C-alpha cells in the first residue's frame, strides 16, 4: 500500500508540474502575441487616423515665387513630422526651396 501511495503522489507531482509549466508557457505566448499585436496597431495607427493626403495641384508660376521660403520650410517640416515625407524627400525639397 505505501508503494501505491508513493506512486500516486509522484504522479500527482509530475502532473502538477506539467500543468504549471504548460500554463506558464501559454501565458508567456499570449503576452508575446499581445505585444506583437500592439506593436502592429501602433505602426498602423498613424495611417488610420490621418485623413488621406489631398493631391497637390500645380501652383501658378507667380504664386510659387511669391510664397515665403520660411513658410514653405515650415510646411515641409510639418509634412515630415506627420510621416508624409521621408528624410530624403524632405532634404530634396528643402534644397529646391533654398535654391542649393
Image (cartoon, rainbow, N blue to C red):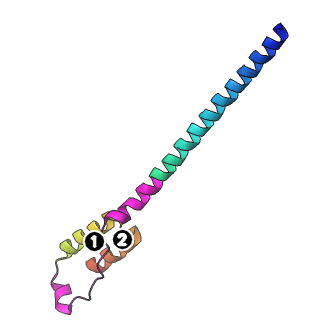
Picture residue at 78% right of the left edge, 12% below the top: 5
- Answer above or below: position of 91 versus 24: below
Within-10-Å neighbours for mark 1: few <14, some 14–19, many 20+: some
Q: In this picture, which residue range is highlighted in magenta?
A: 39-67
Picture residue at 28% right of the left edge, 71% below the top: 76
Q: On the rendered structure, is 100 left or right of 13?
A: left
Q: Residue furthest front?
A: 1
The image quadrant where one finds the N terminus is top right
The image quadrant where one finds the C terminus is bottom left
Badge 2 element = loop
Question: Which tag, 1 or 2, sits closer to the chain's start?
Answer: 1
Give percent across and percent down for residue 49. Answer: 32, 63
* Cβ–Cβ under 8 Å for marks 1 and 2: yes
Is 33 magenta? The answer is no
| Location of residue 93 (image quadrant) | bottom left
Picture residue at 20% right of the left edge, 92% below the top: 61
Q: Which residue is mark 1?
A: 76
Is 61 magenta? The answer is yes
Give percent across and percent down for residue 78. Answer: 26, 66
Q: On the rendered structure, is 99 left or right of 42?
A: left
Badge 1 element = helix
Tell me the CA gap for discs 1 and 2. 8 Å
* Total numbered labels: 2
Q: Which mark is residue 85?
A: 2
- Answer above or below: position of 85 versus 44: below
Q: On the rendered structure, is 1 left or right of 34?
A: right
Please tell me which residue lies in front, 8 or 53.
8
Give percent across and percent down for residue 16. Answer: 67, 24
Amino acid at each position: 500500500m505505501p508503494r501505491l501511495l508513493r506512486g500516486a503522489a509522484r504522479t500527482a507531482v509530475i502532473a502538477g508540474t506539467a500543468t504549471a509549466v504548460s500554463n506558464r508557457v501559454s501565458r508567456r505566448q499570449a503576452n508575446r502575441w499581445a505585444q506583437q499585436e500592439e506593436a502592429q496597431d501602433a505602426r498602423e495607427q498613424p495611417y488610420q487616423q490621418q485623413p488621406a493626403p489631398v493631391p497637390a495641384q500645380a501652383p501658378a508660376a507667380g504664386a510659387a515665387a511669391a510664397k515665403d521660403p520660411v513658410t514653405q520650410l515650415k510646411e515641409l517640416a510639418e509634412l515630415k513630422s506627420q510621416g508624409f515625407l521621408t528624410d530624403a524627400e524632405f532634404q530634396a525639397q528643402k534644397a529646391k526651396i533654398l535654391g542649393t
